[in-house]
């Protein structure tokens, strides 16, 4: 973690003039871009221009919206009352600002994040990403925003007793998911019956149904399909590397995919959070893996088993990717990312370069060059927001 990378643009992270969402439920990503661009070496003016341009007109074609007034007092006695209700974001910010000022970042995150991370897939993982990026930048105000956003957008990943997964490792789990999708009609019907009609879930905020994507993810999570929520059985010192590699292979199976890219950037965020929480590594990875399977199924991002298996075989045992040419490739990807309107691309480069620095595996470098584009909004956006 380092605050030095963002020191020259820390004032942008201090800015509270905009709401965390716009046009209903679309996430304001601009501070993620500030951190990622700074981390991959973008010049200060590039970052400041990006911030200004994004606030005026996001890649979705809408401007950011003004911060909303505080209309409710959130305190230690009622902070759980509004979790997941998409209400009182500004009030939650005020509460967590005070908690961080009193306790410090690490203690405040240790107090509230374990409970809030059970809903880490809310806002399509962006609240979790906000927290990971804030902690990496060591920024108290952004950390308070992230905890507030987790409370605001909470969608529970798992609840109650869970079956145990029989997968030997993350890749085995992905291959099993692909096999079930291809050859188990009952499993596939169970998923598709949910995503074909999310209106059946009275628990969902109306704005999520307007989203489509977030409603599908929340609906699959609420259904608790056993093949998706099973507790992982693997652990040990190599677990972090195994999970990173499996998620990267998933991205290479659907290169440039907007949904799967979020699994890479949210995994990075959860790792930073786990480092802050210290003893939470296994718990955080277990939550991540259940969320990954839920999201992959809800958005039908499950590659063919043979493709995933062949990609794993292609990269298995590859020699360390430590040549000067490999580092140069990452530099070119970073320079390309400086030019992108879509902020997910600098985040992709930042995360995969960080992982490559720890584990010089060629798949990270290859995936880092597979940029995404801003998706078209669904027809449901023709209706006004439900806030």
Image (cartoon, rainbow, N blue to C red):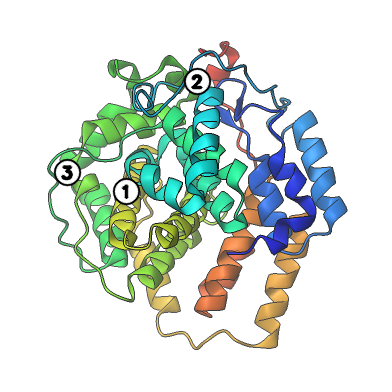
Q: Circle 1 sits in a helix, a strand or a loop, which is it? A: helix
Foreground: 107 or 310? 107
Query: Residue sitting at 20 percent across and 39 percent down?
Result: 225
Q: Residue furthest right?
A: 45
Where residue 111 appears, as percent x and y from the top left, is 37, 45
Foreground: 27 or 77? 77
State whether residue 298 appears in this view: yes
Instruction: Determine the CA span between mark 3 and mark 2.
Output: 34 Å
Disc 3 or 1, which lies upstream in sequence? 3
Q: For mark 2, what is the residue?
A: 88
Q: For mark 3, what is the residue?
A: 226
Q: Is residue 363 left or right of residue 111?
A: right
Instruction: Determine the CA span between mark 1 and mark 2.
Output: 30 Å
Observer-side mark, 3 or 2, equals 2
Q: For mark 1, what is the residue?
A: 293
State whether residue 366 appears in this view: no
Query: Given contact means CB atoms under 8 Å apart, are the residues at marks 3 and 1 in contact?
Result: no
Disc 1 or 2, which lies upstream in sequence? 2
Q: Circle 3 sits in a helix, a strand or a loop, which is it? A: helix
Q: Quadrant of the N terminus?
A: bottom right
Foreground: 228 or 316? 228
């Amino acid at each position: 973690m380092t605050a030095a990378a963002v020191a020259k643009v820390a004032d942008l992270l201090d800015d509270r003039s905009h709401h965390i969402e716009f046009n209903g439920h679309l996430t304001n990503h601009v501070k993620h871009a500030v951190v990622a661009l700074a981390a991959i070496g973008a010049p200060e003016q590039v970052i400041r221009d990006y911030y200004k341009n994004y606030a005026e007109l996001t890649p979705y074609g809408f401007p950011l919206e003004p911060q909303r007034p505080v209309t409710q007092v959130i305190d230690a006695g009622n902070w759980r009352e509004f979790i997941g209700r998409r209400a009182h974001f500004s009030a939650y910010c005020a509460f967590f600002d005070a908690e961080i000022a009193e306790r410090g970042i690490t203690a405040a995150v240790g107090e509230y994040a374990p409970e809030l991370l059970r809903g880490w897939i809310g806002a399509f993982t962006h609240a979790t990403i906000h927290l990971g990026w804030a902690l990496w930048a060591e920024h108290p105000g952004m950390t308070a925003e992230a905890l507030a956003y987790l409370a605001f957008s909470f969608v529970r990943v798992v609840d109650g007793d869970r079956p145990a997964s029989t997968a030997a490792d993350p890749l085995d789990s992905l291959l099993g998911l692909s096999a079930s999708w291809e050859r188990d009609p009952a499993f596939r019907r169970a998923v598709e019956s949910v995503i074909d009609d999310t209106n059946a879930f009275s628990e969902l905020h109306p704005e999520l149904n307007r989203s489509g994507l977030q409603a599908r993810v929340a609906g699959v999570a609420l259904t608790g399909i056993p093949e998706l929520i099973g507790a992982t059985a693997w652990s040990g010192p190599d677990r972090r590397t195994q999970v990173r590699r499996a998620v990267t292979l998933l991205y290479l199976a659907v290169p440039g995919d907007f949904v799967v890219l979020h699994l890479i950037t949210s995994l990075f965020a959860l790792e930073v959070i786990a480092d802050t929480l210290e003893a939470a590594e296994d718990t955080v990875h277990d939550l991540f893996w259940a969320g990954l399977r839920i999201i992959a199924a809800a958005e039908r991002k499950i590659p063919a088993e043979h493709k995933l298996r062949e990609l794993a075989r292609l990269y298995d045992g590859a020699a360390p990717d430590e040549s000067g040419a490999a580092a140069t490739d990452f530099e070119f990807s970073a320079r390309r990312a400086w030019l992108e309107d879509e902020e997910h691309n600098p985040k992709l480069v930042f995360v995969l370069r960080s992982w490559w620095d720890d584990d010089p595996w060629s798949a990270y470098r290859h995936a880092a060059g597979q940029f995404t584009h801003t998706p078209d909004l669904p027809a449901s956006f023709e209706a006004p927001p439900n806030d």
